[in-house]
Amino acid sequence: MVVYSRNDENARETARTVKSLGRKALISKTDVSDAKAVGALFQRVARELGRMDILVNNAGVWLVGPLVDLPEESWDRVLDVDLKGTYLCTQAFARHLKTAGKKGRVGKVVNIGSVHGTRPWRGASNYAAAKAGLVNLTRAMALELAEYSITVNVVSPGAIAAGGNAAKSKDPAALKQVETEVPLKRMGRPEEVAKVVAFLVGREGDYITGAEIVIDGGLLLYPYTV
């Protein structure tokens, strides 16, 4: 397994978990919005680990604010990482498999989206644009890469008790809001997202491509009022 991240500690923690399961883990500090860095990463992986079969595009940044005050740099950074990064990594992955040949295997790409791609929140225009674009990018990739036996899907989580939401999962006020807005009345768990990703990259997901799977406890069903 290859763990690529700009955050060394996050990468090391993930690598330790992988190694504890008896698997190899290669760590690479990579900016996914940099085409040269992505190209170098995939060359290294091919050289050290051989053929790649699974790609999970999980890099993302959250630099948001009111539209009238949002710096251009924040807009660019979110779109570069959350959308362009997926394009660059998937392109490199597809080129690798095109060269390696089918060999009876199905290549798998899973992009991590967000409910923000369907329903924007105030103050997160750049993030909403990136995640909405990711859904249609996934569909376009699925169409183009099917000829190389590569499936491409997107998983869109809602309020998950991890990452930026970790603190909220311990905040009584935030949890009260979740109980009000999420029909299942709780935050999701990281493993609930991971299990869906594992399904898609496993053999059971061989005939699924171009799909969006929303994991939000019914959040998008919540009847917002103005």
Image (cartoon, rainbow, N blue to C red):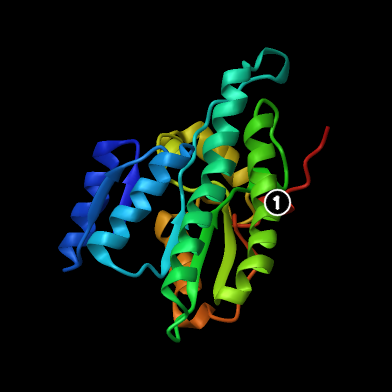
* Residue at point 47%, 55% (across, down): 92
Please determine whether, in this image, residue 24 is positioned above or below residue 26.
below
Query: Is residue 68 rendered to the left or right of residue 206?
Result: right
- Residue 60 image offset from top left, x and y in percent: 49, 40
Q: Categorize mark 1 by other alpha carbons within 10 Å: few (<14), some (14-19), many (20+).
A: some
Query: Residue 43 placed where, x, y %?
Result: 34, 54
Most extreme residue toward the front is: 99
Q: How many marks?
A: 1
Name of the residue lying farthest toward the top: 69
Q: Can residue 54 be seen by looking at this rendering?
A: yes
Q: Judging from the image, what secondary structure is the residue with disc 1 in?
A: helix
Mark 1: amino acid: Leu
Residue found at the far bottom of this picture = 104
In the shown orientation, is residue 224 left or right of residue 157? right
Q: Nearer the viewer, residue 149 or 179?
A: 149
The foreground one among 183 and 26 is 26
Residue that appears at 37% across and 67% down: 52
Q: In the image as oriented, which residue stretches furthest toward the right?
A: 226
Left or right? Give the position of 216 relative to 22. right
Q: Residue at x 63, y 18 (%)?
A: 72
Q: Nearer the viewer, residue 89 or 131?
A: 89
Rendered view: 83 above or below 43: above
Q: Quadrant of the N terminus?
A: bottom left
User: Does the image show residue 211?
Assistant: no
Report the residue marked by disc 1.
Answer: 220
Q: Nearer the viewer, residue 100 or 211?
A: 100
**Identity of the residue drawn at 47% across and 41% down:** 35
> Which image quadrant: the C terminus?
top right
